[in-house]
Amino acid sequence: MWRWLIAVSVLVATPAWAAPHRHVASRDPAFATAEKLWSAAKDPAGWRAAADAFFALAETATDADKVAAARSGWAAARNALAKDVRVEMEPGHWDRKPVAKPLSEPDAWFVQRAERYEQLDRGAPDAVVAEFIRANTLRHYDQLEPANALYLDIVATHRDQDVAEYAANLACDTFVQLGQFDKLLAFVDQLRTDKPFLARFPDLAHTLRAIHLK
């Protein structure tokens, strides 16, 4: 029952985030090369090449160019992702015992780029989205403990962001998958004390109340 309530709350309104690319105005000729890779990208391999070029620049650029390169690298990495892992709800498998699987090479690459972008552009809304998508990618492979650590971090440190609502729902669902019902109830009780947060997200408030009453 809990998982049904959580699933409805997540699926009713899943946001369609995107990280737009902005031309990087830099005198460094390496940026022009990365921009050409961006312009030429037509498939995941092309976007990966562009992302890698921008992230490589971010490692050596000055502060202003570092953030600009990281943002362009993240946008290219998003374009390289072949599937949407914002929310992975699989009703047909809710009763199976989760067994962690290794990430595919493309998804391992994506998770690494997402984490590096978070480090380079801390505090930016897109960096919080990167953390959320990274968590969902891990969750898709049943790596539930590390995924839930990321959901909980988003709720704890980015409660002012809209993505916190989705992270809270998926944290609850992941606690259920892990059979960690004591942790679920403690998390729910903790969130229910934050009245301003729940006032912003009435659907989440309804879900938390239903779990509390169960």
Image (cartoon, rainbow, N blue to C red):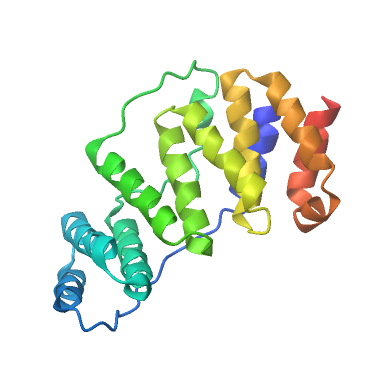
Reply above or below: 4 against 76. above
Q: Is residue 186 shown left or right of residue 153?
A: right
Q: Residue at x 35, y 78 (%)?
A: 22
Q: Is residue 27 shown left or right of residue 204?
A: left
Q: Determine if residue 1 is in view.
A: no
Q: Determine if residue 99 is in view.
A: yes
Question: Which quadrant does the N terminus fall into?
Answer: top right
Quarter holding residue 68: bottom left
Q: Is residue 36 shown left or right of residue 186?
A: left
Q: Residue 15: percent from the left, percent from the top?
A: 55, 58
Q: Residue 89: percent from the left, percent from the top?
A: 51, 37
Reply above or below: 34 against 144. below
Q: Residue 41: percent from the left, percent from the top?
A: 18, 66
Quarter holding residue 174: top right
Quarter holding residue 123: bottom right
Q: Residue at x 66, y 37 (%)?
A: 6
Reply above or below: 23 against 156. below
Q: Residue at x 26, y 82 (%)?
A: 26
Q: Residue 117: percent from the left, percent from the top?
A: 38, 56
Q: Is residue 80 shown left or right of residue 114?
A: left
Q: How many marks?
A: 0
